[in-house]
Amino acid sequence: EDHYRLNLGFCGSYTLWDGGATSLNVESKTLSKEATAFATQQTERSVQESVLNAYMSLLAASENLRTADASVELAQAEFEHYGKLFEAGSITKKDLTQSQSNVLQKQTTQLSAQLSVSTAKTTLRQLLELDGSAEFQIAAPETDIESPDSLPPLPAYEQLKADAQKANPGLKSDSISVRAAQKNTQVASKGSSITVTLGANSSTGLQAWESGDYKGQLKYGWQNSISLGINIPIIDGGTTENKVLQAQVNETESQVSLKENLKTLENNIEKLYLNAVSADMQWKAAILQVEAESEALAVAEEQRGAGALTYTDFLTQKNNLEKARITLTNAKYTSLLSRKLLELYQGKLD
């Protein structure tokens, strides 16, 4: 004959006193959760920064491509015109060959510009997590900006640094992590604290071989109890001390990380600010350079028409103007990128 027992019960306990370890641990976990949320925001900001870089690179590459397309069209038209002049005996074979070579050089530059646009667009598409077959175009108001003078002035450096520190999610995360580490150090020190626990138990059971009256066994066999436990640590073999030391190490590491990230932020802000100031100056200089090269090309065209300038020198002047335009485009978008990154660090793009 099979014999068996069945026991049923409910039990629970509540810590009346543990030196405050439980409340400190709850506070530490809450702070860690808050720090993680700010760390996530910092990751999002890093992605935003990458998107801004890719976006401005695509704008600059697209504008350079438009310049290259125009140069190719102009070179081809010029080559066709020179072909007619050669047939009429107005120019030499050398001039015609140089004109044809100029077309090929412009087409090479055009291919390079197309590759830059394709690369920048792929980078931006990947950052935006768009499908590989997705086609998209960008419409940017920045293309209509002609001079840094039409932009708002840069803020003062000290104000910029203060705003960036205040709005930086990474610093907030690090600061909260330091507080959480301090709580963990306090929790570790409570390992040698007296613990008082209140417990309660309610249970019953039955034995199959004693009686068939199972209901009666369950009813009259019910037992209730209340207990009060006091735990007084005496010797733990240095466990508590080791936990405290480890927690102190983690706390120090958190403080060092906060200081290092603060230094890194200051360095980044200073570099971005100087880049923005320098880019504005380069942008203005590039505008003047394009104006100067345009005037020089106009003079060269007159001299060429009068036969006082060789075709080689004329091409050199045209190339100088094209280089000046490319320099202007790069300076413009470098300035715009620096300003946008400063706005990002100030939290204005959140």
Image (tube, grey):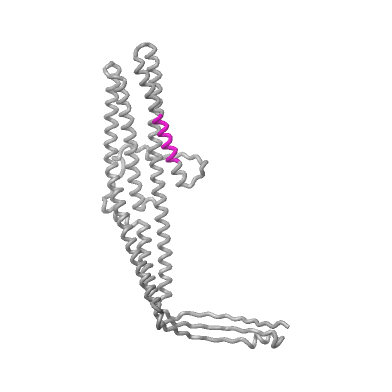
Give the side of residue 52 with respect to residue 14, left or right: left
Return the x and y of residue 261 as percentages of the image width and height: 33, 57
The residue depicted at 38 percent of the width and 64 percent of the height is: 177
Inspect the magenta stretch and tell me whether residue 36 lies in it.
no
Q: In the orientation shown, which residue stands out farthest toward the right? A: 1
Above-or-below relation of 8 to 287:
below
The residue depicted at 30 percent of the width and 29 percent of the height is: 320
| The quadrant where residue 298 appears | top left
Return the x and y of residue 32 as percentages of the image width and height: 41, 65
Instruction: Report whether residue 345 is seen.
Output: yes
Inspect the magenta stretch and tell me whether residue 113 lies in it.
yes
Above-or-below relation of 185 to 330:
below
The residue depicted at 66 percent of the width and 86 percent of the height is: 217
Instruction: Report whether residue 163 is seen.
Output: no
Q: In the orientation shown, which residue stands out farthest toward the front? A: 237
Above-or-below relation of 140 to 249:
above
Return the x and y of residue 201 as percentages of the image width and height: 55, 83
Q: Please identify the dominant SS of the magenta region.
A: helix
Which contiguous range is marked in magenta?
Answer: 108-121
The residue depicted at 29 percent of the width and 48 percent of the height is: 273
Return the x and y of residue 215 as percentages of the image width and height: 68, 84
Using the image as rendered, state which of residue 249 and residue 201 is in the foreground: 249
Quadrant in which the N terminus appears = bottom right
